[in-house]
Image: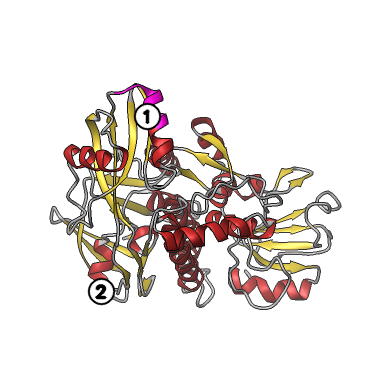
Amino acid sequence: MIDVIIAGGGPTGLLLASELRLHGVHVIVLEKDSEPTRYVRSLGLHARSIEVMDQRGLLERFLALGTRHPLGGYFAAIPKPPPRGLDTAHAYVLGIPQPVTDRLLAEHAVEVGVEIRRGRELVGLSEDDDGVTAELADGTRLRSRYLVGCDGGRSTVRRLLGVGFPGEPSRVDSLLGEMEVGVPAQTVTDVVAEVRRTHLRFGLGPLGDGVYRVLVPADGVAEDRSVPPTIEEFQHQLRAYAGTDFGVHSPRWLSRFGDATRLAERYRVGRVLLAGDAAHIHPPTGGQGLNLGIQDAVNLGWKLAAEVTGWAPEGLLDTYHAERHPVAADVLVNTRAQMFLLSPEPGPQAVRHLLAELMDFEDVNRYLIEKVTALGVRYDFGAGHELLGRHLRDVRLRRGRLYELMRAGRGLLLDQTGRLSVAGWADRVDHVVDVGDVGDELDVPAVLLRPDGHVAWAGDDQAELEDHLPRWFGAPAT
């Protein structure tokens, strides 16, 4: 029997598979497409996702193929400088097209032993007390202990489970594609700058060799968004907004997307779970979609692995829904708000003007960017130290950097006292004693980190530590 089947080989599914493999879990990824997608749905990684890549030793690969951009102007495209004092060592956006992200994550997954089966579409599933049976389009049946649907906004897994997906339908559609233009680059730059003074959902970005990524509002909302638009629709809409179609021709690919917001009622039904767009869809404002899925994966991976390998404390797997569902709900709210602020109508423009003034206050600017980047996420672990539930930024230690010590996906006790112990949990938690070297960056005697980098405990009392270890890492070994 397979330990975990993952339906969907996008960024969420690939990273989740790799997280499971860190703990020796036998995992198979089923991807219905025979070839990797060429569509550039996402353009980059935000700070919290960059931290995740750093924690798993992948960041250098991404930096080599990406471009760092200042972290300013990402909330509703309101032009403001990057806020000061963000709680991260990676205060930038990494521009990198999604096909490149997909390739890097797939390469990593294969390196750690993930089996990726392309051209394999899941069409049915059934669950019993011992596992899940997955039925594929070719008639193959596979058995696994757990199954995770990472199969996108039109998730087959979610539909088969009967999980509700309440929310709001699309009110506006956008056309997106890559194509060649027939006018000089300077003409494109000048016209786009003029149009974007009033229409922020419009843009043409150069990709090289005369090819541009084209974004333009659609004429109404499509009944079936799976049907791609035509080049003639792009030409018509470009003329409607810019007075010219820029001579666009020879499209590489064409697509459309809407601004629907929907959130799965449950992230878990027995042995089947949902992650990424299968669990939540929202407008693309702020570039949060792919990043939200990546953070779902790193939250779920170690918990599901703990269930499979047998050391999970009671209720650990249910904390996946408890922690990630509210985060997605907040993303739905802030993306819908950003869509409102992008409208050229007088009412939204008045609110936009007022918010732009408020963002001149450093705390407001920082608060909104922390929403977009997920640096502001704090899971509810109850009362305690102000760090409790938050991610911990990378800090420098005598032996290197904190994130370099998190590559194995285990828990970690960073101990500046030299007096604490994780005896009984040493097979699940690493103990790093770094006396006096990180005091300027970490003003707390010791912190216990979960494998996803969030602080599970902070203090200096051994008895308190031993009260918290079982909550996240199960019973001590005897």
Q: Residues within 10 Å of mark 1 (few under 14, many from 20)?
A: some
User: Can you see residue 283?
Assistant: yes
Secondary structure, magenta segment, majority class: helix
In front: label 2 or label 1 = 1
Give the left or right position of residue 331, taking residue 253 as reference: right
Q: Residue 206: x percent and y percent?
A: 39, 29
Q: Residue 431: x percent and y percent?
A: 71, 57
User: Can you see residue 148?
Assistant: no
Q: Residue at x 67, y 46 (%)?
A: 89
Compared with residue 82, is residue 159 higher up or lower down, i.e. above or below? below
Residue 184 on the magenta span: yes
Q: Residues within 10 Å of mark 2 (few under 14, many from 20)?
A: few
What's the residue type where badge 1 is placed? Answer: Val
Residue that protrudes farthest toward the front in the picture: 346
What's the residue type where badge 2 is placed? Answer: Gly
Q: Residue 170: x percent and y percent?
A: 29, 62
**SS at badge 2:** loop
Q: Which residues are magenta?
A: 183-190
Give the left or right position of residue 168, taking residue 341 as reference: left
Residue 81 on the magenta span: no
Q: Quadrant of residue 448?
A: bottom right
- C-alpha distance separating marks 2 and 1: 47 Å
